Image (cartoon, grey):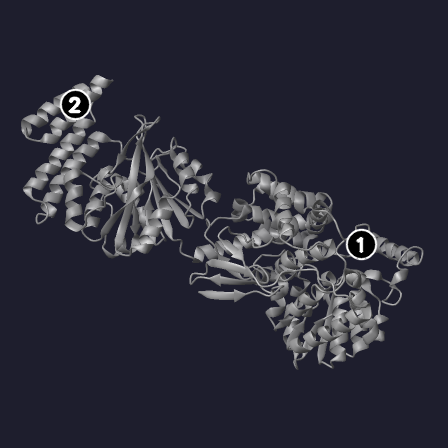
Amino acid sequence: MKTIKTPIIPINQTFAKIKAPHELHKEAICIFVATGFFLDQDTYWKDEVVLRPATINTLDENGFLIESTPWFQWHYTPQQCEFSEALQQFTSLFETIVNEQVGDKKVILPLSGGLDSRTQAVALKHLQKDVKSYSYEFKGGYPETKIAKRIAKACDFDFNEYQIEKGYLWNCIEELAELNQCYSEFTHPRQMAIVDEFETMGEIFSLGHWGDVLFDKMCNEHLNEHLNEHEELAVIYKKIIKKGGLELATALWNAWELPNTFETYLKQRIQKLLNEINITNSSAKIRAFKSLYWAPRWTAINLNVFQKKHPITLPYFDDNMCEFICTIPESFLADRKLQIEYIKSRNKKLAAVQWQAQKPFNLNTYSYNKVPYNLPYRVIGKLQRVLSSAIGKPFIQRNWELQFLGLENEKHLKNYLEAPSFQKLIPTAVTNQFYKAFKKGDKVVYSHPVSMLLTLALWNKKTIKVMDKQQLKVSVVLPIFNGEKTLADTLDSLEVQTFKDFELIACIYGTNDASEAILNTYNSKFKKLVILKNSINLGLGPTMNRLVANTSGEYIAIAEQDDFYYPKRLELQVNLLDSKKDVGLVSGIAEFWDGEKVTGKFPGLLVHGKQYPEGEELFLLNYRNQIKVVNSCMMIRKSVHIKKGLYFTKHYPSISVDWTYILRFSLISKIYGINEILVRLDRRPERNSVTTHREQSFLATRELIRSFKYEYPKIITEKDYKFALRTQYLMEMNTKAFIGYLCLFMKNVIMCPFESRYYLSLKKRVLKKISS
């Protein structure tokens, strides 16, 4: 057992397994494309979760989550105090946290024109830390490095300024995909453009993320702090949905044929999470929601870019800071009051530097950022942007403008969005729809969908690489001969297996029907689908050997083109082989279906709750009574097959191929039967199976019985041999119509008048004839 305690706002995601099907969590992906982050514990997979913030979690030795208990819950318990007292508390706490986090190391401080990094600069200056600061701006955009440079100068910090270049993303996007694991879109982390510069800047980062949420109101001015649950939901919904995100999420939801509507699903998820937060003050409640579900799953994702070079610290993520926020009256937090007064009281020079959000005003004058005082600045700014655009130098405000626009960027985008493997995940029509809307429509609205599609394309590429390196647990082999009429039903039953960690390897031999076209429609429905073709009909034995030679799984599961597999077939067999290492082959119960109803179950030994004998006893059971193992739902331990040199013979067609295999297998490894129905065998008269050529099969079976007598003379006695032949005659007799049956009955009775099974068969046939 392993215990993991997560912080109130985790810096890194911690993953755990849960008992669920290993399949894409399409609902979660739809939320991701709508919002830019995965909600709550969601991941790309249904059987994987991220541990919740502020919890103590117990995992077993295989990484499965056993228990999760909260150790902290967000609350709103405002203390009765004056603002000056709260400011003093914040000052002491903030500077203590910063001091403890950075110690004596040289600090790397990213600076912006906002308040969060400026607040850190004040603390670091007051604490007399050795600081290297930097900032960056878009080429052709607002010169925010000018503000950052003034902040650095006011604190006597060394300062570097950088420019985000057009198209930088394509040189580092694969590396970024590894760093953030595609849990964030790629235009947000601008720091990737200068990541190599971090190497020599210092020893530890001090990052200002999340201060703007902790130290501000969460409800707009026209809203009070006691909203009803529908109003709270509306506030959250509006905050998290990105432009164009809802449209893309809905398109994917419909393309994947998910139930109900995306909006309904998302709102229900949000409402449920909001209901779990026991806070009545709406501003505090919304802050808690964002800190629980937004900070660790969106803000924190790209921190790995910094961590790649040096350790990181985040004073606003600190547990003590989060607990402190819960005790401060909302009126003190609103409008950044605490941060502003802290800066003004500690460093008057910094207070006089322009505040980018309130430009051109500073912390002393920002109250004048309203008409008519700000009108001249707004007019001049508008004119500058219009003139720049007119001379072919548009004003750059967003990173995607540098990374997505232009012919060179378009070439890189299409390289990912048009990859054949990506089309298996996202329908081509959806990708084309949104990229076309971005190119010809509102670029601001459709830049987010394009960025999310790019993110999914990188995740898909990365996942395929990992899957190619990983060995899938099971290889399902499927020989196909004129299978177009029943193949889709078989594939559908394999698609809904509860066990998903398998590859499907199909081989079409000697036919030119629609089987291959049908298989191709299932390309995206299996983790891995391999289609082999034999140009001529080599027979079932060589086809099976070719299929097995192309497997990569630990276990090999046999399937047939006209059989229906119940959903837990693979799961039950894998669990059996995993738990019983001495078993080399496992099968189960089959039911016969005539197109309208189930007509019987096989083998009776398993149907009645019994188990197969072992070794020579099982060999003789199968030899004397014909095959008693359902061949079309066998699962084989591949290591036994290889080490013992087993193969499927080409000397006997149809069912005898599996019969010889099972006979030999029973002498070298244990065979186990699951006492559950795993497969429904199609026994309609018109079926076209690889095992329906009766006369050919009868001849081959008689030859097999004779040849095995000579191959295993120490095991098969003359009595066993004759019993096996009579079993075969009985089976041939039972395939005939009534008159033909009577003729064969007389012939067989003359040869062996004391075979009681013949008379029992006659009794059943006559009674059936009378009843019909």
Q: Position of residue 32 (x, y in %)?
A: 61, 51
Out of 135 and 205, give the one closest to the viewer: 205
Which residue appears at 74% of the width and 45% of the height?
A: 442
* Residue carrying label 1: 392
Name the N-terminal-most of marks 2 and 1. 1
Nearer the camera: disc 2 or disc 1: 2
Percent x, y of residue 112: 76, 67
Q: Pointer 1: residues within 10 angstroms few (<14), some, or many (20+)?
A: few
Label 2: element kind: helix
Where is residue 691? Give x, y as percent.
27, 34
Q: Nearer the viewer, residue 431 or 31?
A: 31
Residue at the right extreme, as displayed: 372
Q: Which residue is mark 2?
A: 741
Q: Is residue 678 visible?
A: yes
Answer with the quarter of the image where residue 699 lies: top left
Q: Residue at x 63, y 62 (%)?
A: 300
Quadrant (top left, top right, bottom left, bottom right) of the N terminus: bottom left
